[in-house]
Image (cartoon, grey):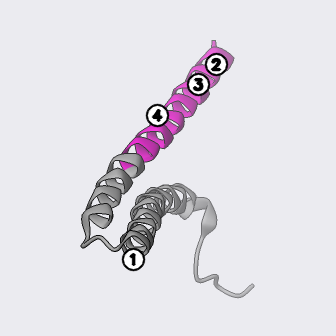
Amino acid sequence: MPKRLFNFKQTGKITEDLSIIMQLGLTMAGCIIFCLFAGLYLDRFLGTRGIFTTIFIIFGVIGGGVTVYRQILEITESNKKNKQDKNSDVD
C-alpha cells in the first residue's frame, strides 16, 4: 500500500482549526474591503475628498469585528455543547 502524504485522521483537528482561522480572517478582510469600495464610490459620486472612505473603513473594521466575534461565540458554544453531550454519554 502506498504511503500517504497526509494522514487525515491525525491532522483532522489541525485542518479544522486552520479552516476556522482562515474563515475569520477572510470575513474580516471582506468586510473592510467591501466598505472601502463603498466609501470610494461615494467619495467619487459626491465629490468629497476621502471622508466617506475613512468613515466606511471604520464601519468595515467594526462590522468585521462584530461578525468575527459572533462566529467565535457560535464555534465555542457548539464545542461546549459537543463536550457536554460526550460527557453525558459516558455517564
Which callout, 3 or 1, points to the residue nearer the camera? Answer: 1
Q: Residue furthest bottom?
A: 2
Kind of residue at badge 2: Val
The C terminus appears in which quarter of the rendering?
top right
Q: CA distance from mark 3 to mark 2?
A: 14 Å
Which callout, 1 or 4, points to the residue nearer the camera? Answer: 1
The N terminus appears in which quarter of the rendering?
bottom right
Q: Residue at x 52, y 54 (%)?
A: 13
Upstream in sequence: badge 1 or badge 2: 1
Q: How many marks?
A: 4
Upstream in sequence: badge 1 or badge 4: 1
- Check residue 81 in the rendering and tell me which mark sits there, or answer none: 3
Magenta span: 65-91
Is 46 on the left-hand or right-hand side of 76?
A: left
Q: CA distance from mark 3 to mark 4?
A: 12 Å
Report which residue position mark 2 lands on.
Answer: 90
